[in-house]
Image: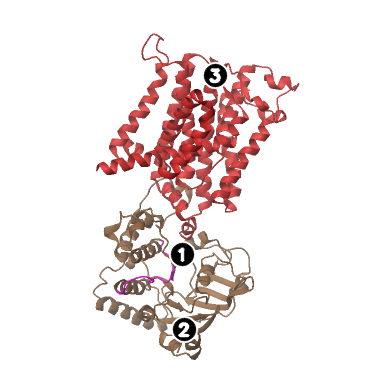
Amino acid sequence: MRLTQLLSDSPRNAILIGLCFLVLLILPWLHLLPETSSFHLSAYWITLIGKIMALAMVALALDLVWGYAGILSLGHGLYFALGGYAFGMYLTRETAGTGLPDFMRFLSWTELPWYWAGTQHFWWAMALVVLVPGLVAFIFGYFAFRSKIKGVYFSIITQAMTYAAALLFFRNETGFGGNNGFTGFTTLLGYDITASSTRAVLCFTTALALLLSYLGLRYLMSQPYGRVLGAIRDSENRLQYLGYRTLWYKLSAWVLSAVIAGIAGALYVPQVGIINPGEMNPVNSIEMAVWVAAGGRGSLIGAIVGAGAINAIKTYFTVAYPEFWLLILGGLFVVVTLFLPNGIIGVLDRFKKEKE
Amino acid sequence: MLITNAATSNVATSQKVTNDALVKNNPSINNPMKNSKNTPHITVAENTPTRPVTTLAEDYGDSGGLAHPVPKSGPDMRHGIALYLEDVSVWFDSFRALNDLSLYIEAGELRCIIGPNGAGKTTLMDVITGKTRPTKGSAFFGQVHNLAKLSTEEIAEAGIGRKFQKPTVFEKFTVLDNLMLAAPKDKRVSKSWFNRIDAEIQDTLDSTLDQIRLKELINKPAGLLSHGQKQWLEIGMLLMQRPKLILLDEPVAGMTDAETEHTAELCLRLKKNHTLIVVEHDMTFIDAISEKVTVLANGAILAEGTLNEVQNNEAVIETYLGR
């Protein structure tokens, strides 16, 4: 398979998408230019771009299960936050040095809980970023799919899951900083987390992770695997009569999606400098579904475009008219559902067809 | 499965002759299955007992889905019987969809099942494909596959393919994608990450496309096909699975006369290498393909025999055909 094919179906779009990714990969380094240069990007912008790219990765993960396999998750914030917490544990340990993290000392704990073991090592924390969301998704998905829970019932359960997890993480006794979560990070692998070069590298890593997840998922969706997921969305029963064990297809897509969301969470936390149970708030997860719907389901690139567009609008409105943001979000959802069933990508496709 | 019994070889030859004659006399059949050389012709011994001496549950006990390890080659039909249904009953609360039904289908047979609505025809197919479990009785595919225990996917893998009453193809996918989904390959997740089309799959695809006459439409979304074409596409998906036993639920519903005729030819050609069970209301179609007809009524067998015999059967006339 050629690289252009991996980026998009038509060569022209492939070049366009490739250029966009190239820009995203170059942008982080502009932060390192001297402030007097007209190409210099401030820390605000670099953090914002990095943050949105991490969120776009979650949208990508959600598109895999929703757009292809037809499983609507309203709880992907859980996997995102779990990845974030796993990496946050490492950052907290780095900040605390050899002592206990601050919030534990306030609780007058004398030693680390067992599940914090090894989190001072970067690679173990990275493993947790993948393993924890993956394992939670596997256990939850296995029982839900085996019980043949589908459609809106499944969505409601995912919602309940993330809410239950939020309540659990709010408790101080859980050992994850309760209400405040983790914050006040100072270093990452020994480098100052607020230094320009660290920021640029983090932003670049996020862009790279986004590109790789896009290419990987696009490849996978062009293979029989993607075709089977699409067939599950349209008629799962029929597929079983062809001899497919749909449970494992759904479960593998679900776990892969959770892992990508977890990695996105891990990239998000060092850039925004905080992780708290608010990320597990059901509203956050619903917003993720809105990104995918707005961008266009089942096209992968649509999820990235949707996440980018909605977050750009959000960034503007929450500063300019903070009290109206939720109304605008709700309005957007109504407009997309009524007029843009295939999202932004659907509109672009229609323009292109009319031109031809 | 080739029977080398001297007594039966005559039968085999005569059957082959009739099949060949059919092909010769019918100009529209000009694409015999490419792989027919490799697969042995299934011929049915005349002296095969229509009922085994002992029931299978006694032979194999009741332990799990498979009575003993099954060779990869598929179901064990050494006894010449493809499908055993013994005293099968299906009760939905107080409603008895099937009532102590016993049915034996010989390997290589084409059996037609007719009956009024609600006679239990579709329930029978559901039992065979594992969608519905029999309330009592036993259902075996060949000697070892216990249909009452295996899952739908395992039954499909063992070699039973089903065409539904209402054509169910994947409408957003192209004809080719639909057929490739059904292709004879390992259907586990890990095998689906790479697109591999080997010679076997290619051969199956070519011969299937020849038979269902959709070669020019392979890149058309299935949702845009006519009703008859969708029926054929579904039959094509069946053929791609390379099943041993094919269940066709009303295959010619909504087809034009010419399409019906072509489907009849297809069924007769399939009979050479497959066992078929056809449920249909269209008597002209049944007349064209049938050798043995089973009439179902109220979940039990009312009559069995050639179409002519059952049509003249008093009980059948009473309950189904009408005077």
Q: Secondary structure at mark 2?
A: loop
Residue A202 percent coordinates (x, y): 48, 22
Q: Which residue is mark 3?
A: A189
Q: Are marks 3 and 1 on the same chain?
A: no
Provide the chain ID for the residue under circle 3: A
Q: Which residue is mark 2?
A: B47
Chain B painted colour? brown
Q: Please tell me whether residue B242 is drawn above or below residue A247 in the rendered image.
A: below
Residue at (37, 81) in percent of width and height: B287
Q: How many marks?
A: 3
Residue at (28, 44) in percent of width and height: A353
C-beta proximity under 8 Å, tags 2 and 1:
no
C-beta proximity under 8 Å, tags 3 and 2:
no
Locate the C terminus of chain B and report the quarter of the image it occupies.
bottom left
Answer yes or no: is residue A13 visible: yes
Report the span colored magenta: B241-257
Residue B101 percent coordinates (x, y): 56, 78
What's the amino acid at mark 2?
Answer: Asn
Q: Which residue is mark 1?
A: B159
Q: Please tell me whether residue A260 is drawn above or below residue A224 in the rendered image.
A: above
Residue B81 percent coordinates (x, y): 49, 75
Closer to the observer: label 2 or label 1? 1
Using the image as rendered, state which of residue A216 and residue B245 is in the foreground: A216
- As for residue B247 lying within the magenta part, the answer is yes
What's the amino acid at mark 3?
Answer: Leu
Q: Please tell me whether residue B1 is drawn above or below residue B236 in the rendered image.
A: below
Answer yes or no: is residue B143 visible: no
Provide the chain ID for the residue under circle 2: B
